[in-house]
Image: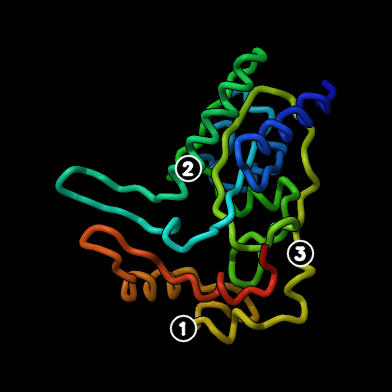
């Protein structure tokens, strides 16, 4: 089956109209290397395309997490906006006869890997996706659809990071190294150094994000 170039272009145009900063399309075949729970077909058995969208972190307040155990509340401000945009794309596709499924944040897909698979950009040394359009100051979400859309070319290496070690030098957790990224050290530092905005709202460390020279 030939992938639908026209519908793909229409979705790109629609995404711009509803305020999406970055969009990419990935082929589910490239997700086979991940655990089954993190593959597109785990969420939609007839998944033919993964759509990744991103919004720029224009203000640090959008990157805040609010948790209230008493009322069972746990949400991220920018993620809530992203999910709303996904519902708009889902409705747009349904009107054209294609069913879709919005991927939950957890367990979900590996969003940064999905972005690289979709050709949005590479994953940098700081373990963040670097969009070729707007840099690394973005947050991502995804949906899968049975629409057979044109997909991007996967990106496996970062041209931006070859001669740059800024994030390595500024990381307070020493989690970013020349030979890889230490996820546990990053997590431990974040949980011990949450920036509290209020009783229930915090912001995680964004030092490497702010330091990355590839910005919007």
Quarter of the picture holding the C terminus: bottom right
Quarter of the picture holding the N terminus: top right
Of 78 and 58, which appears nearest the observer? 58
Q: Position of residue 203 (x, y in %)?
A: 38, 65
Quarter of the figure with residue 61: bottom left
Q: Residue at x 64, y 59 (%)?
A: 129
Helix, strand or loop at mark 2: helix
Q: CA distance from mark 2 to mark 1?
A: 30 Å
Mark 1 = which residue?
172
Quarter of the figure with residue 152: top right
Mark 2 = which residue?
81
Disc on the earlier residue, 1 or 3 = 3
Numbered badge on residue 51: none
Q: CA distance from mark 1 to mark 3?
A: 25 Å
* Badge 2 vs badge 3, beta-carbon distance below 8 Å: no
Name of the residue lying farthest toward the bottom: 169
């Amino acid at each position: 089956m030939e992938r639908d170039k026209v519908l793909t272009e229409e979705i790109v145009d629609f995404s711009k109209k509803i305020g999406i900063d970055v969009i990419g399309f990935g082929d589910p075949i490239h997700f086979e290397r991940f655990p089954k729970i993190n593959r597109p077909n785990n969420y939609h058995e007839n998944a033919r395309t993964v759509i990744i969208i991103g919004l720029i972190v224009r203000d640090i307040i959008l990157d805040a997490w609010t948790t209230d155990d008493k009322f069972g509340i746990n949400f991220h401000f920018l993620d809530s906006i992203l999910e709303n945009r996904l519902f708009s794309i889902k409705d747009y596709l349904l009107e054209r006869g294609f069913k879709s499924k919005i991927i939950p944040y957890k367990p979900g897909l590996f969003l940064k890997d999905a972005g690289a698979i979709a050709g949005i950009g590479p994953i940098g040394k700081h373990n963040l996706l670097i969009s070729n359009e707007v840099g690394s100051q973005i947050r991502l979400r995804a949906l899968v659809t049975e629409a057979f859309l044109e997909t991007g070319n996967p990106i496996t290496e970062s041209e931006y990071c070859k001669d740059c070690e800024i994030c390595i030098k500024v990381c307070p957790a020493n989690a970013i190294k020349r030979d890889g990224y230490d996820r546990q050290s990053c997590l431990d530092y974040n949980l011990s150094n949450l920036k509290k905005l209020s009783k229930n709202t915090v912001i995680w460390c964004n030092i490497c994000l702010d330091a990355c020279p590839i910005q919007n």
